[in-house]
Image (cartoon, rainbow, N blue to C red):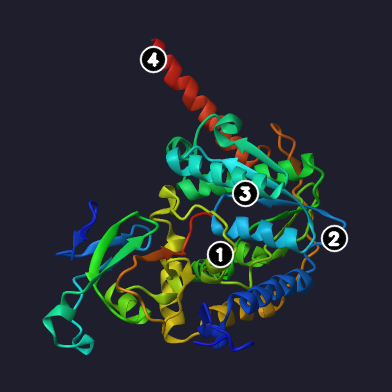
Amino acid sequence: MKCRVCRGKAVIDLPRHNASFCPSCFDSYLMDQVWKAIDEFRMFHKSERILIAVSGGKDSLALWDILNRLGYRTIGFHLDLGIGDYSRESTEKTRKFALDRDLPLHVESLAQEVGASVDSIADLTNRPPCSACGVSKRHLFNRAAKTMDCQVVATGHNLDDEASRLLGNILHWQDGYLEKQNPALPDEGSLVRKVKPLNRLTEKEMAAYAFLKGIDYVVHECPMSVNAKQLFYKKIMNEIEQESPGTKQAFYFGFLDRRSHFYPEKDESPPSFLCRECQSPSYTEICTFCRIRLKVSLAGRDQDSGTHS
Amino acid sequence: MQETNMRLRPSGPILWTKGLQLKMTEPQTDNRQGDGKDQEEKTISVFNAQTGLRLRFPFRRKVHRLLKDLKLDPETVLVIQGDQLLTQDEDLSAEMEVEIRPVISGGAS
């Protein structure tokens, strides 16, 4: 197979573009896609400080690498989720990535913030692990961005993540989530802007980029996400894509093109409350993150009193 | 040469990646590889980078034939041999281990 651009030996074929690329032309293609996403959604500009949420996986490490190459001012933020060997490996690889490239990295631990790891939080609060993880990340990313004077939080969500999420949201007509499914969410009150610069690139393209750039990432899947619905939706989307290449991007980009038609922009007021516990903006008196934290704390006290009685 | 942690031709379905529940079954004999007995017995070592599982399968010359045997969607994996990323139509070398690296990750979004 030959590269569509230079006719050199191809290392990746992209049926959705009916194209194959050699390492060098693939790099140009990928950087161009990221640039297009940043530009189209006016995600950020060179004078801003960007907090990159880095998990240690291929997407977030590749995103950090790309934004650094594009000359943006970035700070990495890694949250140690306390999921045994998986988290140890994730933290280790993230630290090594930052150290090798001399990039600033801030690491926090979920256990220190909430008093328990993701699996314990899920047990104590009767939430699916991915939900407990998601709520905690959103809260702590926002807090870290404000603390470190960053104007924007960037995450490594890719086209597969977004298309599968869209499928799930449509299947259950989650209007609230559909309305907010945008690769660039503006800042709102004290919630900083959130962006997804990899939304034009597939999971395979990101894995290929990480491999070709020698990025050492965590290949193992999060043990907590084994039965996650999102993986099932990804499988369905990939089956459709195999039969009809290009469907995934047509589905997702088509939604973004029509989103404002279905969900017109509203002058939304920011959350009216400030959380009683952490002073973050919240739609209720106590924000979801603090409710989780309090439940974990109460459960811990109950266990202690049970042990001592 | 038999590696210590390697089994020859799995006898039943194997859980290939936990999350996606992709299963691979006993590969079918591929007559297009030739009818000679020697060729039928030629195997290749396949390493799954996500599960750490290392197995031997009947050798297939083309990447897409191997993936078909393993019942893997090409969009969900990288195929690596040596330090080379391989495309679907590329030839495999029977002498070198082939790494299958699943690319799907998931959970909270």
Disc nearer the start of the sequence (2/4): 2
> Residue A191 at x, y = what percent?
76, 49
Disc nearer the start of the sequence (1/2): 2
Instruction: Determine the CA span between mark 4 and mark 1.
Output: 43 Å
Give the amino acid type for the residue marked by disc 2 in the picture. Answer: Lys
Front of the two marks 3 and 1? 3
Tag 3: Cα neighbours inside 10 Å, few (<14), some, or many (≥20)? many
> Which quadrant of the figure has residue A36?
bottom right
Disc nearer the start of the sequence (4/3): 3
Say which chain tag 1 marks: A
Q: Secondary structure at mark 2?
A: loop
**Mark sitting on residue A174:** 1
Q: Secondary structure at mark 3?
A: helix
**Mark sitting on residue A46:** 2
- On the same chain, marks 4 and 1? The answer is yes
Disc nearer the start of the sequence (4/1): 1
Position of residue A51 in the picture relative to residue A204 (left or right): right
Say which chain tag 2 marks: A
Which residue reaches farthest right? A47
**Mark sitting on residue B70:** none
**Mark sitting on residue A307:** 4
In the displayed structure, A234 sits above or below A151; it is: below
Give the amino acid type for the residue marked by disc 4 in the picture. Answer: Thr
| In front of the other: A261 or B51 | B51
Say which chain tag 4 marks: A
